[in-house]
Amino acid sequence: MIDFHYWPTPNGWKVSIMLEETGLPYRMLPVDIRRGEQHRPAFLRVSPNGRMPAIVDHDAQGGSLSVFESGAILLHLAEKAGRFAPTTPRGRTALNEWLFWQVGNLGPMAGQLSHFRNYALGEHPYALDRYAAEYRRCLGVLEQRLEGRNYILDDYGIADMASWPWVLIAKPLGQSLGDLPNVSRWRAAIRDRPAVQRGVDLAKELRRSAPPTEEERRILFNQTSES
């Protein structure tokens, strides 16, 4: 059994999709990031960075194993299931390239754009322009990669699962995919997978569209090295 520490966000969806795709048995444990549950000592023992998702694999070789960071979790689950990751040396290199590209480029740029578009108080035109341009640049990189191919690598796998949630939310981020036909096709094809739909729908009743309260804002955005 896998304990899955989760909240319905794009980073959480990466892992919920993978768990649904593989059929590995798991128990979802909600981490209410609005209430600061990600900063509780019990969770920090699983995820020292105080961020979800995280897992505890109770059936790992050698005993229970905790894994934090979405990319590391996807790699662990792919190895455990024997699916959704290349097995050749060249294939693994390509996987690492595109997985690290997502966690170092597409995800952070989209996340910062979302922050300044949806959460930051006041006007921040430079930040909005900066992160919108970088997110758009990343979409262009993905558009080029998908030219002549159905998926990021030869077959559907964790490289797609990592990137797709951050493209799913392009419209709320103010970005049209109308002039990105390869990305649009790829986005739609993955969206239609039943396991992807189940992964995105996991705990969807916990989502909230209203802006955060001042207390939630403090919890989400004002953490320091001492707290």
Image (cartoon, grey):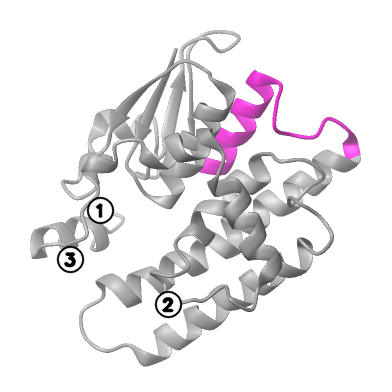
Q: Which mark is residue 174?
A: 2
Q: Earlier in the sequence, mark 2 or mark 1?
A: 2
Q: Secondary structure at mark 1?
A: loop
- Looking at the rendered image, the disc whose residue lies closer to the viewer, 2 or 3, is 2
Q: Residue at x 62, y 64 (%)?
A: 184
The x, y position of residue 191, in whole percent, is: 54, 48
Residue at the spot of label 3 = 211
Q: Is residue 129 above or below residue 86?
A: below
Q: Which residue is mark 1?
A: 226
**In the image, is residue 120 part of the stretch drawn in magenta?**
no
> Residue 156: x percent and y percent?
71, 41
Element class at badge 2 = loop
The numbered mark, 2 or 3, whose residue comes first in the sequence reads 2
Q: Amino acid at mark 1?
A: Glu
Q: Quadrant of residue 74?
A: top right
Q: Is residue 35 left or right of residue 132?
A: left
Residue 122 at least partly seen = yes
Position above or below: 123 against 40:
below
